[in-house]
Image (cartoon, grey):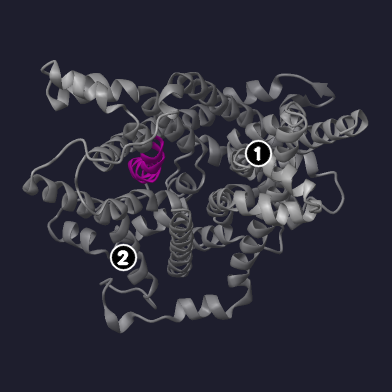
């Protein structure tokens, strides 16, 4: 490739990296310092002198620490059971662990509020025995639901690393006279300590970034966290509302980036294990009785926590009017589902989210494959601005990124106030998933195969169609699935960026719930949950098919 073309590509990647990813964040930073007649620190002093700000910071830290503790206990426990024991039904248990993470937070929250509604069996029992009923609109409930949802982050971060701990180290410990508990403590857990710490950081970052759960449970109870406080400021009408929201956003972003930096520092120590192949054979052989107890206790606990609330939400969605009993069949019907399917402004949110997500996937695949192919074949340094920009925007809390999009794109004609800005925000937020997937996929394409195709007279189009795409399609499919589950159900970006005359699926459900239409919101959530489960099953089917073809 000529030097001129190399220069053009470098310039193009630089322009995209700056204009699409970095400049919006800079616009947010700039806005925080803007005061009448120039720049200053007045916005910072106004924000941090407020008792409400200090309370929001306190609530954010308490909720993040509490939910992270729950996530780490559940995540480590189930990772250890799945990776090391000889129990059966591991696929089912893993699915149950991951389910609350795949299902959006606002749906999980709705299911738990249905479980502990005023007419629920649990609260009726407590009320009948003179005991205080369970109030889901509290800081403890936010911690519990967030912790259960984030347990999958710890689990996924740890389970494969546990399988990569060399058996030789365990055997040497046992030969030296140590029991299995001591071996786990001194060998296994020390080996995977970086992964455990990384899981803790990921759960903590997910907690401070979460908007849906504290907005659903905390707003009516007067519980404010940084994400919801930024949202309140952003939609406020005060003369300095946007500036103060920008100040809060910077504080939240610094907190998030500090966690990312700590995670990077910790993960440097896990490079050796990352290069080891996972061992799926059981290392802790339980007796028949203990195996059955461990297996069915795990399933029972996960079903109780992750499935029962969803089932209760389904029955609650069937209620036509208020009933003293959740299971009163005379008061049940599918009217809410019919209303959603027959009312355009109700199902439009589903179609809008689906269209935006598919468009995001196609744009991200095109940009990612183009950039990573160019990087691997021509210039390894050219794509650095794009990659660093995508990493920053993916790590930035959603509410912060949404605010930066407003500041940067508000003066661009035909972008702000349309679905176009939401599409840009989706690509900006989730492109990194496809960049990583494309880079991994293209590493598997041997350059000799391309050279052979060119020598045999194949055109560039034929080379891609017959050689490159068949090799990389599996990895691209997996990365696209991650993007789909994240973008399709997202709420934070659309809460600030969606056009006035349209709604995404997340915002539709959120508005129904906050507007008091709980049964409609629950019916919509049930339909969304079934759709997500169907997508997961389709993905698993194609993965099994791919493994069978490769095997």
Q: Position of residue 175 (x, y in %)?
A: 14, 19
Q: Residue at x 79, y 46 (%)?
A: 455
Q: Position of residue 423 (x, y in %)?
A: 71, 52
| Label 1: how many Cα within 10 Å (few below 14, some 14–19, many 20+) | many
Checking the image for residue 312, the label placed there is 2
Residue 152 among magenta residues: yes
Asked which quadrant contains residue 39, the reply is top right
Q: How many marks?
A: 2
Q: Residue at x 69, y 43 (%)?
A: 368
Where is 302 relative to 504, above or below?
A: above
Where is 458 relative to 146, above or below?
A: below
Q: Is residue 402 visible?
A: no
Residue 71 among magenta residues: no
Q: Is residue 153 visible?
A: yes
Where is 176 relative to 317, above or below?
A: above
Residue lying at the far right in this picture: please name it. 4
User: Which region shows up in magenta?
Assistant: 138-157
Q: CA distance from mark 1 to mark 2?
A: 35 Å
Q: Main secondary structure of the magenta part?
A: helix
| Label 2: how many Cα within 10 Å (few below 14, some 14–19, many 20+) | many
Q: Which residue is mark 1?
A: 401
Q: Secondary structure at mark 2?
A: helix
């Amino acid at each position: 490739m000529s030097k001129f073309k190399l220069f053009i590509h470098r310039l193009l990647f630089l322009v995209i990296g700056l204009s699409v990813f970095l400049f919006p964040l800079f616009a947010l930073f700039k806005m925080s310092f803007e005061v009448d007649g120039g720049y200053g620190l007045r916005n910072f002093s106004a924000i941090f002198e407020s008792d409400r700000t200090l309370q929001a910071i306190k609530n954010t830290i308490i909720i993040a620490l509490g939910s992270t503790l729950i996530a780490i206990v559940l995540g480590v426990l189930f990772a250890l059971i799945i990776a090391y024991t000889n129990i059966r039904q591991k696929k089912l248990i893993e699915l149950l662990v991951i389910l609350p993470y795949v299902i959006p937070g606002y749906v999980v929250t709705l299911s738990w509020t249905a479980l502990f509604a005023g007419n629920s069996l649990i609260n009726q029992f407590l009320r009948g025995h003179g005991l205080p009923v369970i109030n889901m609109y509290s800081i403890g409930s936010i911690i519990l639901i967030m912790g259960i949802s984030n347990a999958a982050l710890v689990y996924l971060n740890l389970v494969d690393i546990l399988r990569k701990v060399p058996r030789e180290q365990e055997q040497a410990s046992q030969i030296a006279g140590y029991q299995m508990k001591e071996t786990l403590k001194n060998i296994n857990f020390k080996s995977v300590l970086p992964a455990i710490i990384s899981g803790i950081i990921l759960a903590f970052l997910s907690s401070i970034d979460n908007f849906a759960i504290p907005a659903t449970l905390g707003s009516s109870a007067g519980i404010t966290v940084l994400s919801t406080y930024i949202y309140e400021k952003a939609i406020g009408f005060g003369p300095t509302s946007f500036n103060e929201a920008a100040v809060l956003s910077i504080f939240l972003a610094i907190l998030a980036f500090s966690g990312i930096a700590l995670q990077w520092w910790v993960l440097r120590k896990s490079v050796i294990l990352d290069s080891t192949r996972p061992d799926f054979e059981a290392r802790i052989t339980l007796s028949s009785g203990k195996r059955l107890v461990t297996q069915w206790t795990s399933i029972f606990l996960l079903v109780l926590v992750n499935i029962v609330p969803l089932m209760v939400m389904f029955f609650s969605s069937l209620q036509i009017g208020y009933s003293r009993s959740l299971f009163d069949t005379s008061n049940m019907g599918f009217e809410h589902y019919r209303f959603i399917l027959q009312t355009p402004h109700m199902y439009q949110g589903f179609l809008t989210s689906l269209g935006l997500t598919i468009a995001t996937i196609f744009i991200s695949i095109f940009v990612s494959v183009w950039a990573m192919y160019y990087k691997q074949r021509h210039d390894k340094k050219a794509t650095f601005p794009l990659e660093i920009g995508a990493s920053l925007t993916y790590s930035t809390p959603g509410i912060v990124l949404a605010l930066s999009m407003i500041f940067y794109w508000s003066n661009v004609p035909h972008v702000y106030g349309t679905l176009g800005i939401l599409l840009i925000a989706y690509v900006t937020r989730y492109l990194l998933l496809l960049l990583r997937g494309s880079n991994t996929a293209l590493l598997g394409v041997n350059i000799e195969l391309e050279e052979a195709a060119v020598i045999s007279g194949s055109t560039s189009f034929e080379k891609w169609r017959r050689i490159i795409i068949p090799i990389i399609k599996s990895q691209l499919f997996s990365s696209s699935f991650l993007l789909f589950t994240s973008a399709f159900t997202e709420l934070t970006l659309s809460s600030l960026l969606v056009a006035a005359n349209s709604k995404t699926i997340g915002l539709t459900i959120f508005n129904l719930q906050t507007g008091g239409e709980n049964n409609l919101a629950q019916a919509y959530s049930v339909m969304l949950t079934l759709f997500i489960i169907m997508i997961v099953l389709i993905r698993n089917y194609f993965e099994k098919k791919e493994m069978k073809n490769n095997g």
